[in-house]
Image (tube, rainbow, N blue to C red):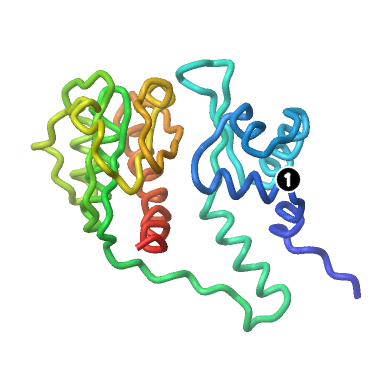
């Protein structure tokens, strides 16, 4: 009896698509960046990104800094679900077990966005809540948004005493990870070692703040595992 290939193997089982997944596992990327990293023609990269999008492994989001650009992000949770089913399709004993929560890493992480009023403040608070040293800053700091405070309070995290900081305060300091959270600051931030990009839209109302908090929480869960691997 012929068996259908598991969905993950069908989607990822091509050298170019595997390279794309590997790059997007580290950072959200624009097509031009992926083309340069892979050394492949843009039309070929776009074709394989389309395949990954149709498999719901990759999502696309228009850049807030330049509407001509689109950032691609990897859905790690979906990858995990499909990988778990891939092993089980061969033999039940090969079903992947979800990893345990890693111990807090003795690492330093810096989150950057334009205003340091919402996304980067929430990311810092979420990571600190998990026991990791985290900081945040912005290229044009402004007061912390009350919706950010409320979204964190709903998760049992007190953000009321947070203050906005300029990214210049951290230039020259060493961090194990630097993560930009908005497309505008990605274009202006100084060079930091280990920099990555999460293209997250600026929230405008309370439900949007809650959605951003949920996305940050999921991304940080996966970030913790990468921090542990480099401990």
Left or right of 2? Residue 52 is left
Q: Residue at x 51, y 55 (%)?
A: 77
Residue 150 in percent (x, y) is at 20, 37
Residue 52 in percent (x, y) is at 68, 44
- Extreme left residue here? 161
- Extreme bottom residue here? 93
Along the line of sight, the residue nearer the viewer: 192 or 214: 192
Counting the numbered discs, the total is 1
Q: Residue at x 18, y 51 (%)?
A: 156
The answer to which image quadrant residue 112 occupies is: top left
- Extreme front residue here? 172
**Residue 48 against residue 116 in the figure, above or below:** below
**Residue 20 against residue 44 in the figure, above or below:** below
Left or right of 44? Residue 125 is left
**Residue 231 against residue 125 in the figure, above or below:** below
Q: Secondary structure at mark 1?
A: helix
Quarter of the figure with the C terminus: bottom left
Residue 195 in percent (x, y) is at 41, 39
Residue 180 in percent (x, y) is at 38, 33
Q: Residue at x 32, y 28 (%)?
A: 113
Question: On the image, numbered disc 1 is attached to which residue?
Answer: 16
């Amino acid at each position: 009896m012929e068996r259908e290939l598991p969905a993950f193997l069908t989607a990822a089982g091509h050298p170019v698509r595997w390279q794309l997944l590997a790059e997007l596992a580290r950072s959200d990327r624009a097509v031009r960046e992926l083309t340069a990293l892979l050394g492949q023609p843009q039309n070929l990269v776009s074709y394989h990104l389309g395949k990954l999008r149709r498999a719901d492994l990759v999502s696309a989001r228009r850049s807030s800094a330049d509407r001509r650009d689109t950032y691609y992000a990897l859905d790690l949770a979906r990858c995990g679900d499909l990988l778990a089913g891939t092993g089980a399709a061969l033999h039940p004993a090969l079903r992947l077990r979800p990893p345990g929560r890693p111990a807090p890493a003795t690492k330093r992480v810096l989150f950057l966005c334009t205003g340091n009023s919402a996304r980067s403040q929430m990311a810092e608070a979420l990571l600190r809540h998990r026991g990791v040293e985290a900081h945040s800053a912005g290229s044009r700091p402004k007061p912390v948004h009350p919706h950010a405070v409320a979204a964190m309070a709903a998760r049992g995290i007190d953000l009321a005493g947070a203050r906005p900081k300029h990214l210049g305060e951290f230039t020259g300091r060493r961090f194990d990870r630097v993560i930009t959270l908005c497309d505008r600051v990605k274009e202006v931030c100084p060079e930091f070692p280990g920099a990555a990009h999460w293209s997250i839209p600026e929230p405008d109302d309370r439900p949007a703040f809650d959605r951003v908090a949920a996305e940050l929480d999921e991304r940080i869960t996966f970030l913790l595992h990468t921090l542990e691997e480099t401990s």
